[in-house]
Image (tube, rainbow, N blue to C red):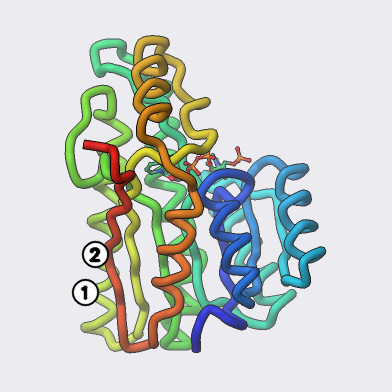
Amino acid sequence: MSVKDKVVVITGASSGIGEASATLLAQNGAKVVLGARREERLKQISDAIIEKGGQAAYRVTDVRNPDDLKALVSLAKNKFGQIDVIFNNAGVMPNSPMSALKTDDWNLMIDINLKGVLNGIAAVMPDFVAQKHGQIITTSSVAGIKNFTGAGVYGATKYAVRNVMEVIRMESAEEGTNIRTSTLYPGAINTELLQSITDKATLAGADSLYEKVGISPDAVARVVNFAIDQPEDVNVSEFTVWPTKQA
Ligand code: NDP
């Protein structure tokens, strides 16, 4: 089974990497189910996919709420009859130096980037275990494999999901549940992500880096497509996607 006809739930689908992935996967015949908080954006993206002959559905989803994730997965099953893949992609990056003590931003990142991913995993796990088939893809970051100043807590959430994903891979192999896992480590990708930065100096630094080296979210979408497209006995568990110009 390739990308075609797979039912793929995508969080953070209202812009950036999630939008690009939904669009590409739908072009390749997947049935995509989009979740995020901005309904108007979800509707536009879903309408555009359907207009081009693809299949899509959407539901307003806050990944901090476990019931929202369960409802999104239920929508996938009710509308398209099955659930094959969840792409845990929603995230925010309000970076700042630790000494700035932006504790509200710390908690927001833990709630969305870490607990939000766990909520997505919990929403699909019962079906994936029962059907002995399923794929979990999660967007970590290069900040989940190396340290960046300003990204203390962001990096912590991205290191954490890396651990969770690898342990799911190992446990699934031991338990014989055939759950495939892919963790993505993108570098600077030109999306709306920097809009969540509240610290002025951090924002200026990020803006200047992204302007110099940032690449299109389509680069990550192609990797997501590749991971889903592999045969069932192949689990490509990690991808790092650097812009060629980023050191
Ligand atoms: P965008 O800001 O364009 O997309 C983020 C998405 O997450 C939006 O669709 C947003 O939708 C959604 N989102 C944020 N909070 C929530 C929430 N509480 N519930 C549901 N959805 C939410 O940025 P990217 O596409 O870049 O980000 C996607 C992922 O990629 C993130 O996890 C990010 O950390 C990661 N990443 C990005 C990199 C980059 O350079 N851009 C590099 C490495 C990793 P809405 O506001 O409508 O809810």
Residue 22 occupies quadrant: bottom right
- Residue 136 in picture, x, y percent from top left: 41, 68
Determine the secondary structure under disc 2.
helix
Q: Is residue 171 above or below residue 115?
A: below
Q: Please state the total of marks drawn on the protein image.
A: 2
Q: Is residue 203 above or below residue 3?
A: above
Q: Residue under circle 1?
A: 170
Q: 161 left or right of 24?
A: left
Residue 240 occupies quadrant: bottom left
Task: Give me the disc on residue 247.
Answer: none
Q: Amino acid at mark 1?
A: Met
**Residue at disc 1, CB closer than 8 Å to ligand 1:** no
Closer-to-camera residue (2/132): 2
Q: CA distance from mark 1 to mark 2?
A: 6 Å
Q: Residue under circle 2?
A: 166
Q: Amino acid at mark 2?
A: Glu
Q: Are marks 1 and 2 in contact (CB under 8 Å)?
A: yes
- Residue 228 in picture, x, y percent from top left: 45, 74
Residue at the image point whose x is 48% and y is 88% from the top: 131
Residue at the image point whose x is 42% and y is 81% from the top: 129
Residue at the image point whose x is 62% and y is 82% from the top: 5
Q: Give the position of the C terminus as an image quadrant.
A: top left
**Residue at disc 2, CB closer than 8 Å to ligand 1:** no
How crowded is the residue under tag 2: few (<14 C-alpha within 10 Å), some, or many (20+)?
A: some
Closer-to-camera residue (244/191): 244
- Residue 175 in picture, x, y percent from top left: 26, 84
Q: Is residue 30 above or below residue 103?
A: below
- Residue 155 in picture, x, y percent from top left: 27, 37
